[in-house]
Amino acid sequence: MEGDQGQRQREAIDTLSQEATNAYSEFLNSALGFYQNALSTATQVGQQNMEQAARRSTRQCRLGRAGQ
């Protein structure tokens, strides 16, 4: 009888440990996903800003040459 109870306790501990590990893994994946999205957005904004600056610079150069 005590052997059965010990086995059930071990199984319960294993199940709880696995559930805790899964929950923590999901938490880390969620945090990583948030970071990746933030980095992707920042990269896109930076790229857009660089493109806008290049267009402005090109426009200013053309206007400068036209005034000469």
Image (cartoon, rainbow, N blue to C red):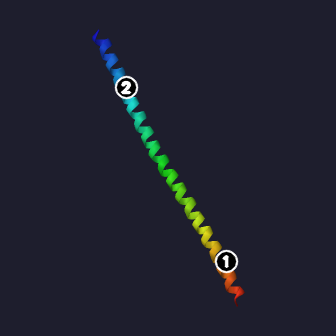
Q: Quadrant of the C terminus?
A: bottom right
Mark 1 element type: helix
The tag earlier along the polypeptide, 1 or 2, is 2
Determine the CA span between mark 1 and mark 2: 67 Å
Q: Quadrant of the N terminus?
A: top left
| Image height of 3 relative to 38, above or below | above
Name, please, the residue furthest toward the bottom: 68
| Image height of 33 relative to 10, above or below | below
Q: Nearer the viewer, residue 41 or 63?
A: 63
Q: Determine whether, in the image, residue 28 is placed left or right of residue 58.
A: left
Residue topped by disc 1 = 59
Neighbour tally class for label 1: few under 14, some 14-19, many 20 plus, Cα within 10 Å: few
Residue topped by disc 2 = 14
Q: Quadrant of residue 27?
A: top left
Q: Quadrant of residue 10?
A: top left
Please report the residue visible at 38 percent of the width from the left and 25 percent of the height from the top: 15
Identified by mark 2, the residue type is Asp
Instruction: Give the total number of marks visible in the rendering.
Output: 2
Q: Residue 48: x, y in percent?
A: 60, 64
| Image height of 25 relative to 42, above or below | above
Please report the residue visible at 57 percent of the width from the left and 59 percent of the height from the top: 44
